[in-house]
Amino acid sequence: MRQRVFLAVSVVTIALLAGCAQQPITEPTADASTNTPAASAPSQAPERPANRYGLDCPELADPSTLESIFGTAQPFGISHEFGGFAAEPLVHDGALLCRWGDGPYLDSQGTGLQVVAAPSANDVSVALQAAQELGQLEESATVTLGQVSANGRCVAYSLGDGGLCNYVVVSGQTMIAFQLSGLPLDQISTADDSTESPELVGSLNPNSTAFTLMDGIVRKIATAAILPEIKANPLPDCDSVVSWATIAEKLELPLGSVVNSDAPVDYSADSRYWSYYDVALNAAGSQAAERQGVRRCSVEIGMYVYDEQTAPISLWAEFVPEGAWVRDSGLWLGWDQEVCQNWAGGPACEYSWISPSGVAAHVRVQGGLIDDEGPAGVGKLIEEELS
C-alpha cells in the first residue's frame, strides 16, 4: 500500500493551484512512497539563487522591531505560500523575497510581513497602467516611503482580525511590493473611525512603527546596486514541456485544458478589481517566468466525483531548470515522499523531486489520481517525458 504523510488542514475552498502557507513547513518524517520517480540527484548543498540586490532579508528588518509592531515574534522564512504568486520564477530571476510571520499552513491571512523586490519596474508600470485605464485597480491610499510614492492601501477589520496593507513602490528599475497582514489597527490610519463597518479602508499610519520600518526597507532596496542577470536554460512552454497527451493516455484518462499559470493577465477579459500588489506580482512573475523558462502548469485530466459533485481532476505541475536550490528553499512540500492535505473539496497530494537533468519538478494531484497513481506515480510518468 502506498504510504503518505497527511497534514491536517481546514480551508473554506479548494485551491489546488496555489500553496498558501505563511511559514516554512518542516517536512514530516515517513517512508518514501513505493511508487516513486527516479531517485533525486544527489544534493550538492544547493543554495537559493543570490538575489540581484546583494541584500539579505535579516538585514532589512530587526526581529525586535517586528515583535513590537505585531505584539508577538515573527519568525523569518520563505514559505510554501509563495507558490501562489510565481515565487519560483521570481527567485530564479534574482528577485529578493522575504517573509516574516506565524501564519499556519494554507492560511493566507496569517500575521506577518512579506517583501518582494525585482528589477521589473517597466513590466509592472505597463501592467498597472493597463489595469488602471480599464478601471480595474482598487482605489489607492498613497503614502510616501523612502521619498518615493507607494501605491496601495490598508483595510482595517474592526471585528478583531487586524488589518491588511498592500503597497507597491516603483523606483528606477526596481519594483518593491510588500504586504503586512494581521497588522494591529493602531498602525493604520482611516478616514472613518466608526466601528460599525467591518472593513475600513485607510493607509499606513505615518506615525507608526510599521511605517518607519517600511520606509527604511524601501530606502535600502531602492538604493542598492542591481547585479547582472543570470539566465538559466529555459524549458519549453507548459503545453510542450512534457507530452500531456501521452501522460493522459497512460493514465487512461481524457486530457482537458493545459494552462500556463504565469501567462500575463489580460485585464480587458477580467472584470475583477485588482490590488496594486497583485497586479505587480503577476506582471513581475510572468516576465520572470518568460526570461528564465520556469514553468507552472495547470492541467485537467479526467473527472471525479466528490460530495455528490463532479469536477475536473486538477493536476498542478512546476518545473525549474537548474533548480537544485528549490529543495532547501521551503517553497515546495513532498520531497521524495507524498504529502497530503485535507481540503473542503477533497484531499490533495503532492510530490517533489530533482530530475537527473537538473530540473526541479513538483506535482500536486486530487480526485481519482490520488487513489490510482498518486502524485509519485504521476511524477514517474512526467519524469519519463522529461528524460
Image (cartoon, rainbow, N blue to C red):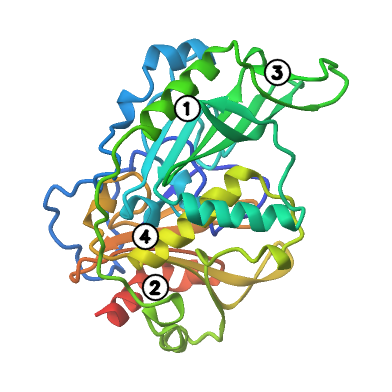
Q: Amino acid at mark 1?
A: Asp
Circle 3 residues within 10 Å: few <14, some 14–19, many ≥20: many
The residue located at (39%, 48%) in the rendering is 119
Q: Mark 1 — residue?
A: 102
Circle 4 residues within 10 Å: few <14, some 14–19, many ≥20: many
Between circles 1 and 3, the one closer to the viewer is 3
Residue 174 falls in which quadrant of the image? top left
Image-based side of 280 in relation to 26, left or right? right
Q: Amino acid at mark 3?
A: Ser
Count of number-bearing discs:
4
Task: Name the quarter where the C terminus is drawn.
Answer: bottom left
Q: Mark 3 — residue?
A: 189
Determine the residue located farthest toward the right in the rendered image. 196
Q: What is the secondary structure assignment of the residue under circle 4?
A: strand
Between circles 4 and 3, the one closer to the viewer is 3
In percent of width and height, residue 238 lies at 44, 75
